[in-house]
Image (cartoon, rainbow, N blue to C red):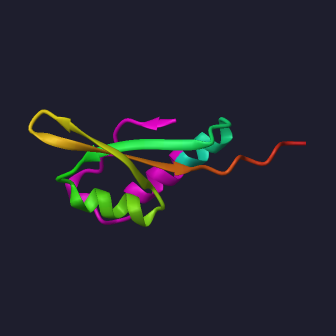
Amino acid sequence: MLIYSVAVRPEVQRCGLGRRLLAWAESEASRAGCDRIRLYTNALMEDNLRLYSSLEYEETGREPYVASTLVHMAKQVPRAAART
């Protein structure tokens, strides 16, 4: 599963909303049977890189993009328990 964008309004940043959005996306990926979740961010977004790393996302590559660099990251997602 690919996360295209995580955005939180500036006035409510640093309140945990980004973490909650990512947790929800990871839960949905697990529920859908995905084994991995991917995202990318601009290399200049150092706060984003720190957040993703703290949530166990690992860098998988970099690529030039316009006048900057995209950083690709991924995280293994545990499979959801089968319903009985």
Residue stretch in magenta: 1-25
Residue in the image at 55% along x and 48% along y? 26
Check the picture and name the quadrant holding the C terminus: top right
Closer-to-camera residue (35/16): 35
Image quadrant assignment for residue 29: top right
Q: Is residue 54 left or right of residue 75?
A: left
The image shows residue 14 at horizontal and vertical percentages of 30, 65
Q: Is residue 58 left or right of residue 40?
A: right
The image shows residue 82 at horizontal and vertical percentages of 82, 43
Q: Is residue 3 found inside the magenta-colored segment of the image?
A: yes
Closer-to-camera residue (77/72): 72
Image quadrant assignment for residue 70: top left
Does 71 appear above or below 53? above
Residue in the image at 65% along x and 35% along y? 32
Q: Is residue 26 found inside the magenta-colored segment of the image?
A: no
Residue in the image at 45% along x and 56% along y? 57
Does 31 appear above or below 14? above
Residue in the image at 68% along x and 37% along y? 33
The image shows residue 9 at horizontal and vertical percentages of 25, 51
The residue sitting at the right extreme is 84
Image quadrant assignment for residue 35: top right
Q: Is residue 62 left or right of residue 52?
A: left
Does 8 appear above or below 32? below
Tally the marks: 0
Closer-to-camera residue (27/58): 58
The image shows residue 71 at horizontal and vertical percentages of 29, 46
